[in-house]
Image (cartoon, rainbow, N blue to C red):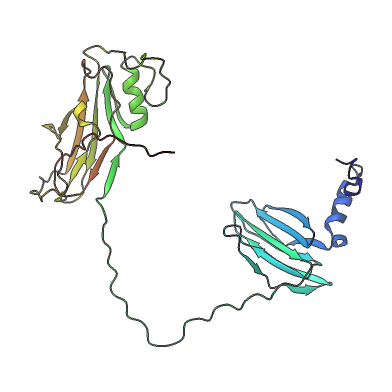
């Protein structure tokens, strides 16, 4: 490249490199960046020459301090390019030493793009006028409406498998623990490649399985509308505070139900043992506590998913 375009390359020794670069960046080329005193930002710049001007990109990579300074150019107009929208707007520059000076301030971290032109740019538009004085407008009281039931995911669980119990475990390592105590290195349905039917054909002994218990405490009275949603409840024996419960399929608009009892703390859990219809242990499901129309367990029926064309 240097042989083909020798006019665009300058060879200097190592000892003269700093002096040469400083001269190229200085007033000799009609461009200079002056950082503000005590500037603690980490400022980088990239400049491109165009036929009718140049483009300057400033980047403050500090995550703690802003970067302030000014840019001097001998061009006749300066614009700011919005890096998010691409909009261009003229900047108010002050004359200095036969050129223009523009101040900049970049928060941590941020970037700014400026364009200097050989032709003058339009002056920046004046700021929009403020609201005219007059009678204050009356506003209605603020109203907030809940659009859907509140959902709280119970991510921590007491898990028992292979005669060992671990308490207050995050659901992901608890899931791996259940598989490892049933003869598998990890959950193959998380991330694995199956050759033929080597995974789905595997069976487990009758005494395999696991038990998962999700605990939560309600402060104050129990809400009238409280339910717990289970994923695939047909695979588990489900208990709530020691009582066996069964899942129900909720109608589209369930009718209001009587309020639930008012315990101060509750726990829900499930256990599973593989059978011929279920040859592998399932991962502990993530339970969700919600507040819709009644204190009941809901099971969403299976539906087929249809994919649209690519």
Residue at (23% x, 18% y) in the render = 274
In the image, taking residue 36 as reference, residue 192 lies left or right, namely: left
Q: Position of residue 162 (x, y in %)?
A: 27, 17
**Quick one: quadrant of the N terminus?**
top right
Considering only vertical position in the picture, is 275 above or below 36? above
Residue at (41% x, 88% y) in the render = 134
In the image, taking residue 3 as reference, residue 34 lies left or right, namely: left
In the image, taking residue 135 as reference, residue 103 lies left or right, namely: right
Q: Is residue 115 visible?
A: yes
Q: Position of residue 43 (x, y in %)?
A: 69, 54
Considering only vertical position in the picture, is 114 above or below 13? below
For this orientation, the residue located farthest to the bottom is 134
Q: Which of 109/233 is in front?
A: 233
Residue at (85% x, 51% y) in the render = 21
Number of numbered discs on residues: 0
**Quick one: quadrant of the C terminus?**
top left
Q: Is residue 36 visible?
A: no
Q: Which of 204/170 is in front?
A: 204
Answer with the quarter of the image where residue 243 lies: top left
Q: Position of residue 99 (x, y in %)?
A: 81, 70
For this orientation, the residue located farthest to the left is 258
Q: Position of residue 33 (x, y in %)?
A: 76, 60
Considering only vertical position in the picture, is 150 above or below 287? below
């Amino acid at each position: 490249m240097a042989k083909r375009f020798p006019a665009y390359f300058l060879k200097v020794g190592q000892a003269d490199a700093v002096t040469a670069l400083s001269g190229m960046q200085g007033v000799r080329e009609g461009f200079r960046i002056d950082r503000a005193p005590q500037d603690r930002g980490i400022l980088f710049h990239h400049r491109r020459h165009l036929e009718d001007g140049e483009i300057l990109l400033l980047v403050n990579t500090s995550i703690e301090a802003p970067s302030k300074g000014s840019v001097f150019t001998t061009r006749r107009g300066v614009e700011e390019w919005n890096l998010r929208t691409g909009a261009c707007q003229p900047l108010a520059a002050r004359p200095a030493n036969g050129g223009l000076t523009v101040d900049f301030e970049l928060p941590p971290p941020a970037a700014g793009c400026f364009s200097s032109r050989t032709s003058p740019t339009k002056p920046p538009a004046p700021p929009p006028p403020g609201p005219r004085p007059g009678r204050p407008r009356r506003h209605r009281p603020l109203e907030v409406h809940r659009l859907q039931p509140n959902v709280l995911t119970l991510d921590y669980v007491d898990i028992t498998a292979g005669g060992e119990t671990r308490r207050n475990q995050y659901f992901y390592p608890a899931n791996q623990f259940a598989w490892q105590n049933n003869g598998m290195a990890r959950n193959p349905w998380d991330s694995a490649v199956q050759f033929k039917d080597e995974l789905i054909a595997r069976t487990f002994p009758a005494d395999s399985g696991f038990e998962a218990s999700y605990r939560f405490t309600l402060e104050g009275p129990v809400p009238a509308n409280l339910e717990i949603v289970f994923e695939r409840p047909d695979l588990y024996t489900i208990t709530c505070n020691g009582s066996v419960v069964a899942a129900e399929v909720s109608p589209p608009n369930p009718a209001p139900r009587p309020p639930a009892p008012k315990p101060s703390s509750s726990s829900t859990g499930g256990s599973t043992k593989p059978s011929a219809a279920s040859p592998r242990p399932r991962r502990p499901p993530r339970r969700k506590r919600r507040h819709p129309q009644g204190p009941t367990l809901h099971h969403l029926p299976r539906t087929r998913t249809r994919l649209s064309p690519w």
